[in-house]
Amino acid sequence: YWKQSNHTPSPYLLQKLRNYESLHRRCGPNTELYNKSIEQLKSNASTRPSECNYVVWLESGGIGNRVISMVSTFLYALLNDKVFLLKLPDDFHGIFCEPFPGTSWILYSDFPIQDLDGFDISHPQIYGNIRKNNLLRNDMDAAKHSLPPYLYLYLIRFAWLFLKSNRYYVPAFFLNSEYSEELSLLFPEKATVFLYLRMVSQIINCSLTGNILPEKEQHTEKQSHNVKALSEIYLLSFSDVLLTTTFSTFGYVAYGLGGVRPWLLLKPENDVDPSCRQSLSAEPCFHFRYSYDCKTRKHVDKGALVPCVKHCEDFTWGVKVVDETLVIRRH
């Protein structure tokens, strides 16, 4: 059972998701194209165009952080025609089900790069280090130059992209003009990204029908904690009204799945009594401090660049995707 939504996904989004499922079946693990890409990765070179390109999600943070970053990474894959894979954390085994029909999204244990857990900001294959060491330049042609076989983004032209994040960085796509037209077609109602990316709800529905949630004996205490957390998130998503604390990724997932604009308990400042305020959208907040614009080489207000991205109510230095009509009415 799933809570009935007052919103309807666009036909363009539904077709995009069907096309993605076809891509995943064609390029997913154990397919001929996947095996070819693995052999190319083993050769430690990326000189030939690849028919299948991948983004691999690496876990970071707790259950709420993981879910919001997974949704963000899936949207990145959707926007860039990449295949979304994940290195399944040990404490996620037996909790999440496969979301894409007829294929798998799990990176198998025999993957040729074995140190994925060691990927961090100091890794030699991180994007910044590759640019710093002049291994990648804007004038490089993949047909003429030997590009790095894979790239790691801590948060193009690479067959393999490894991305580690614990944040909901969807607002960053709305701030990028390259994606503006596509995002408008996918999400005419801007503040419904988390609600419409049914990957998460499909996983939870699968978990319920498979008797994984809300009660199932797990092998470790950590897995048991994740099962209970997902159960509570699922139940909270049925609420008609939600009151949540600030900076809660647990709450972000619950009201994002339910499509409910939450009431947020704001922290008292300057001896002012605590108050609550209803959020402009059910979208999670992108906890993002930095405001440097690479093109203009200036610090900018990220919450004032486009109408559908505003500062979060619970953390003013963060930004979130909102419904422009609500912004107009509130002001």
Image: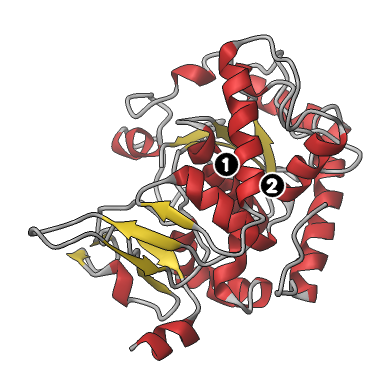
Rendering coords of residue 242 (x, y %): 51, 59
> Is 100 drawn above or below residue 89 in the view shown?
below
Residue depicted at 45% across the width and 39% down the height = 166
Judging by the rendered image, the residue that carries numbered circle 2 is 200
Judging by the rendered image, the residue that carries numbered circle 1 is 67
Left or right of 63? Residue 4 is right
Residue depicted at 41% across the width and 42% down the height = 155
- Between 184 and 267, the one nearer to me in the picture: 267
Does residue 79 appear in the picture of this structure?
Answer: no
Q: In the current view of this chain or complex, which residue is farthest to the front?
A: 273
Q: CA distance from mark 1 to mark 2?
A: 8 Å
Rendering coords of residue 281 (x, y %): 49, 69
> Is 325 drawn above or below residue 236 in the view shown?
below
Label 1 residue SS = helix
| Marks 1 and 2 close (CB-CB < 8 Å) | yes
Reading the chain from its start, which is encountered first: label 1 or label 2? 1
Image quadrant assignment for residue 14: bottom right
- Between 155 and 190, the one nearer to me in the picture: 190
Tell me the kind of residue under disc 1.
Val
Label 2 residue SS = helix
Q: Count of labels shown?
A: 2
Rendering coords of residue 48 (x, y %): 67, 40
Rendering coords of residue 74 (x, y %): 63, 49
